[in-house]
Image (cartoon, rainbow, N blue to C red):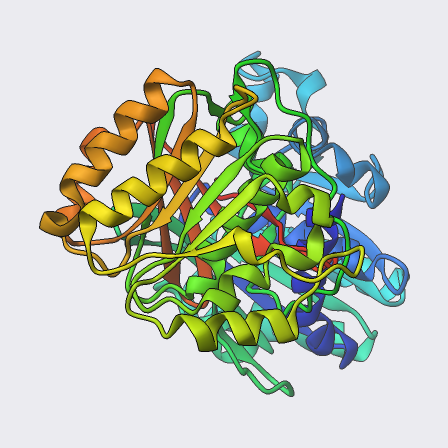
Amino acid sequence: MMMELKVRDAFERIFKPFMDIEPVALLIRGLPGAGKTTLALELMRSVKDKYNCFYISTRVSYNKLRKQLPWVEDILDDSSALQFVPDYAGRSIKNGDANKADSIDLRLSSADTLLNLVVNKLISNKRAFIVLDSWDALAKEIPLDERLKMEKSMLAMADANDGMLVFISEEPEMNTLAYLVDCVVTLGRDERHGVWLRTMCIDKMRGVAIRKNKYVYTLDGGHFNIAENEKKVEYVSSLFPPLASKNGYISTGSRDMDYALDHGIREGSVVVLEVDSNVNMHYARIIAASTVLNNIRSNRPAMVVCGQDEPLVKVLRKIVPHCTSHDLNRLMVFSSPSRIHEQEYATAYRELSTYDKESLNEEMVLNLTGDPEENLALLVDSYIKLKEEGKSLLLYANLIWEDLEDVKDSIVYGAKVARNNRDVLIITVKSGTELAVSASMLADVHIKLVKYNDVHILSIVKPYERIYAMVLDDNGYPTYSLLPLL
């Protein structure tokens, strides 16, 4: 429900200012399967209280339409959803080549007859909102100058009767309408980082400032869902509500991620979070923080190793205010050896307190040094202490600024420990590095995080391929939702 509201808000932010000025015509163009009909009907749904809505199709009957998009029954019925059947198609139906029960047949003989139908609807139904799906299938046989006259006539009649026309086109090279309408939307797809994304371009929108003309969208759930980055999300001191982990798994703290991974992260797994160079690290930290929080709030232990030069306070801000002092007894955080530990801890101690207003426990934060053997001994000793109750432990290490040679042995050792003791090891690595390649071969779960057109895209590469837009949840504590990009 939360995600549905978010994507609906994005749709309204983009199109409501334009629809509020009561335009006359809009053109939606793109290749078959791009979602043109779904977008047109979403626009119809957004104005159904202000217009009398009609859908005229050359391709889809109302029966098929409501099977594909059940929600259209809220805006259309048998009298307002009409299927145009040209003469040659009508003869086929008469001869038994199509199922009559599967279509509502409006027998028209030419585009001229369609023009009369549209004009009639505009005149007899003041403020008519008419979707023509698709206009070029009807008009392609008409000479260009005659076609232009027909289009101008329909637009003039819509303007005179406070109506609106939405033209759907699969012929983007035909530009007669593009010059006449108030808005042109082109649906296409782009390939980025080996992933195909659906894209919507606002090529023209009269009367409205176009602050951004390209968006990522999905047809998940039979709706036209636009993926947008959230505005800045504010976190407050609030308890993180843990999700129950299925037996043999550790929950990620996100219902969507648990579902995407089929119940969460299996105990004894190595998870690699590969982060592209243009990604805001805040997003990667949220993925890690929600998993850590869910573990310690579920009475299980966790260890966090800060990245090289990673500020300790940036990590602790996403954990400490969202749990109790008792929860933190199950957590150990290891600061970067390159940081000034005294200043780091003083800042964290001054700024942060737990949900129950207790100060940080000094024993919770340990300082790594430049000595690998000393660090290993410290990590092993801490691990033994946290594992005293024998529960599955979560170990998260941010290695995004590390080189393979510096951490190769540590990763292999950590993976062996996690698998042998049914723990979970999560490591963050930078895309395009030797470390990322080696870590991916070791991983049971491989996740990539990239940024495209201001949207953070999360793709699960292993154990199977799935792709989502990542949206931060504005509920006071660190978690996120995933919008499937279909």
Residue toward you, 16 or 347: 347
Left or right, 287 with respect to 460, comes to right
**Residue 134 makes an appearance in the image:** no
Q: Residue at x 56, y 58 (%)?
A: 362
Res 329 quadrant in image: top right
Image label count: 0
Q: Position of residue 237 (x, y in %)?
A: 75, 62
Front residue of 361/259: it is 361
Residue that appears at 58% across and 46% down: 290
- Horizontal and vertical percent for residue 102? 67, 20
The quarter of the image holding the N terminus is top right
Can you see residue 333? yes
Residue 264, relative to residue 50: is it above or below?
Answer: above
Q: Nearer the viewer, residue 28 or 215?
A: 215
Q: 219 above or below 286? A: above
> Is 233 or 9 nearer to us in this picture?
233
The picture quadrant where one finds residue 464 is top left
Give x and y (percent) for residue 170: 43, 52
Point out residue 95 in the picture as x, y percentages from the top left corner: 56, 14
In this view, 458 is above or below 164: above
